[in-house]
Image (cartoon, rainbow, N blue to C red):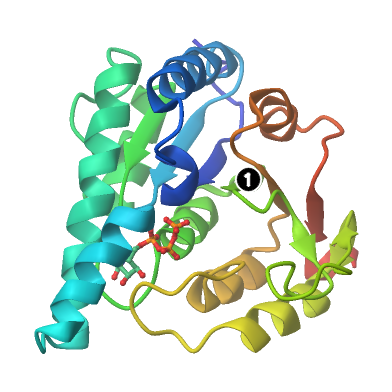
Amino acid sequence: MPARNAREVVLSLGGSVFLTGEQDVEYLRALSAMLREVAESQPLAVVVGGGRTAREYIRLGRALGLAERELDELGIDVTRLHARLLAGLLAPACPPAPLLTVREAAEEAARWPLLVLGGTEPGHSTDAVAAQLAERLHAERLVNATRAGGIFDRDPAKDPEAKRLRSLPFEQFRSLVEAGTDGRAGQEAIFDRVGVERLAHARIPLAVVDGRDLGELKNALLGRVFQGSLVIPPSDA
Ligand code: UTP
């Protein structure tokens, strides 16, 4: 068990990292072994995203005329499906089923070295859930495991000249997020707008790392030097 006074680290594990369609069994086995090892010294809360599967259902629901709120609920169900798979792999170090709310997760945190949850309610993505939980737990840091492996000065999907920012002040991060999203269901973005405001308020550092590189993900979780991007919270910027 981690030391009783150790502050939690929250991991937002993007759904597009969780399942890629390539070597998922090997990845999920190695990921869960690494998370269990880290959780021996550092309590962890993992929030799992819905990725491609969520976007597929949201696309289908939108084409069929479902309301935005119903599309969000579809996305939430997929994130919880992923969270259930991870909880199954991490048990008995975490509760056997994913937790459903930030409040429930915060209440359970003292009892388990690991917690797993998916989405909670409509209106935001799992990044926001992770930020809300980090704020609630006064977490040491939030780690965002993405495919892109960092934050870039321009959209790397559109511009091959885009450069990864090793560290950036919070205001620059906020501008990049605002330039890239409008808040609709199923959008791919650097981070969630709701989550940005929670992090700003709580002054929690955000590390963005390639979630498929387990060595670097472990470094980021443990607060070591890592390959990726570090967002410096407002008070330290
Ligand atoms: P994700 O958190 O997976 O969104 O939630 P994402 O931005 O596509 O992230 P990746 O690709 O997994 O990294 C999928 C969708 O589920 C709904 C939203 O519509 C979101 O876009 N959702 C999720 C909610 O409404 N509330 C939640 O708490 C979580």
Residue shown at the point (43%, 39%) measured from the top left: 18
Image position of 100 (left or right of 201): left
- The answer to whether residue 98 is above or below residue 90 is below
Q: Quadrant of the C terminus?
A: bottom right
**Which is nearer the eye, 34 or 187?**
187
Amino acid, disc 1: Val
Q: Name the residue under label 1.
A: 143
Q: Horizontally, is 1 left or right of 185 in the view?
A: right
| Residue 117 visible, this angle | yes
Spot occupied by residue 70 in the image (x, y as percentages of width and height): 13, 78
- Tell me residue 153's x, y (percent): 84, 72
Q: In the rendering, at what x and y percent does residue 204 appear?
A: 68, 56
- How many neighbours does mark 1 have within 10 angstroms: few (below 14), some (14-19), or many (20 or more)? many
Q: Residue at point 74% right, 67% down?
A: 156
In the rendered image, the vertical position of residue 162 relative to residue 140, given as above or below: below
Figure quadrant of residue 64: bottom left
In percent of width and height, residue 54 lies at 28, 60
